Amino acid sequence: MHQYTPVTGQIMTRWADKVNSNNPYPQYPRPQMKRREWRSLNGLWEYSVTSSMDLIPSKYEGEILVPFCIESALSGVKKGIKPTDILWYHRMFSIPLEWHGNRIKINFGAIDWYCIVYVNRVKVGDHKGGYSSFSLDITSYVKWDTHNEIDISVYDPTNKGSQPRGKQILKPWAAFYTAVSGIWQSVWLEPVPNLYIDHVKITPHFDTEEIELSISEIDTRYELKNRPISLSITQMICEVFDNGHLILSSSSQSMDSLKIRIPDPKMWSPQSPHLYDLKISLAIGNTRIDTIESYFGLRKVEVKKDEEGIPKIFLNNEEIFQLGVLDQGYFPDGLYTAPTAEALFYDVNVAKEIGLNMIRKHVKIEPDIWYHYCDKLGIIVWQDMPNAGNILRGSLSQILFGSKWVWETRTLKKNNEVIAQFEWELHQMVDQLYNHPAVISITIFNEGWGQHHTVELTKKVKEWDSTRLINSASGWVDMKVGDMHDIHKYPGPMIPELELKRVAVNGEFGGLGLKVLNHTWIGPRYWAYRTYNTQSELEKAYAELIENLIRLRNKGLTAAIYTQITDVEQEINGFLTYDRKIWKFSKDFLHKINSQVYY
């Protein structure tokens, strides 16, 4: 084993030297379904790059720091992966003796894109989806009295494939960035009993001051005893806490629906992001078999007409104008993975500090901890589905003058498997983020990239989650469905034509650039929609944008999103530099001028 060091020769964030190679990301990765007993598998693993998906290497070529992707500096490798390559991971682990008698689950935050997992050289499962978390029961494959081996093979074609991938590309340029392959979120083990909670769904009912709770449980006693077992004596127990104080307890023998009325409720909003803690248990008789910790916020979001008859977004029965920022979730040292949880928190808090109330998480799904910070700080999230398929297909004339249906059918090859995979990953995203009060909107497509079956998918997403707004297509090809008519305009801002049912949104505007020496990405070309030479020029241009935005707000615009929170690689239009070390604007200036937008 060699001494871990990140790869140098590029800009790094202030948190790079705080990365602990023995225990990176020590926080429990899933704040809304937390168990007390767990063991992180983050840290140094062995890796190899081969051409075989199922032939475990006899020897590994080096070490890689998980959960940082192989292309990143913080992985200690910083090596690109070709579409013909297979990336392999290997490490040893042991099971604590006190876990004996439990089931053992291995959990993955995210692996990009298709992986096969082996324990002690036996295949235990596989997974497709670069952004969705998944778990495997490895009880039958582990040894309790000695060390165990885990091997993982990963295939990631990046933009040579048709899978959801966001802005990853093999040859970065303009607004497309370095690829991310392999493990890029936390990996951990945890023991669960033979009857355990597998999934929790928390639905807020604002008007009746209730939450509706349902759980999915897994009962492995069937396979252990090879006979059916009655669950009639099994009950779900829910305890609600406010600032550490137990305020109510309720139970039900139905796992499908337990409605709990909250006494003297405190609502969740950007001004007052109140969260209640939950403890949920499965019990047989008076014995609690499994317990998880969670939380919720009580809030409602909907489209209603204001006093002038214009559709607007209402939060908790009050009209809310949303001024947000585009957030790509890239870091120069960790790429898709922030160096530390502190760095994740910093980006969310930036929006709060400069007077914004919303972040558009752009064609990327973050680790659960990021959404947890948004819940706590009161930052509204508009969540994009990462795009799939060929990014640009068809022609500009089809957007401006031609058939929208022609555009749709040409943006993605008519491959049923590809379409089904996109829908599956979209459904996974909706389910994964369901319990976060901060997430109030789901965007299915961005700018026509891989856009297909928009009407059908909008209907499905609304069926999966009726508690949130649906933005069917942000920019470009509008199919007249969903809750928003969203246009992009650079530098903008701009308002789409007002409608009777959908709100008017400027989903991207701004893109004002300023290059800061010694704080830019390595590359021959830098790019922004408009560039300036000094901070004062930049601030003057931004002030003019906001003045125009206020006029559009008064005409019926309900939300606008500025591009963007930080520079990303060769793109230099951030409030901050890519390394987060230099503010291009005065923070006081931004807070003062942004605050003028709200009523």
Image (cartoon, rainbow, N blue to C red):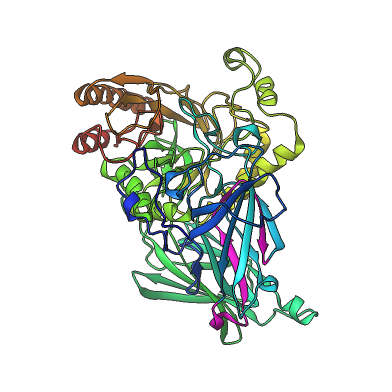
Visible residue check, residue 257: no
**Taking 292 as reference, is 453 left or right?**
right
Q: Which residues are magenta?
A: 96-120
Q: Residue furthest toward the bottom?
A: 286
In front here: 178 or 380? 178
* Residue occupying the point 44% across, 75% down: 248
Query: Does 167 appear above or below 188?
Result: above
Q: Quadrant of the C terminus?
A: top left
Query: Does 273 appear above or below 213?
Result: above
Query: Does 65 appear above or below 280?
Result: above
**Taking 350 as reference, is 199 left or right?**
right
* Residue occupying the point 33% across, 24% down: 512
Residue 121, image x, y percentages: 69, 64
Residue 322, image x, y percentages: 37, 38
In front here: 557 or 18? 18
In front here: 143 or 63? 63
Residue 537 picture quarter: top left
Residue 434, image x, y percentages: 53, 53
Q: Is residue 98 magenta?
A: yes
Residue 166 picture quarter: top right
Q: How many marks?
A: 0
In front here: 296 or 75? 75
Residue 239, image x, y percentages: 47, 74
**Taking 369 as reference, is 442 left or right?**
right
* Residue occupying the point 59% across, 17% down: 399
Visible residue check, residue 399: yes
Residue 123 picture quarter: bottom right
Q: Is residue 38 magenta?
A: no
* Residue occupying the point 69% across, 23% down: 410
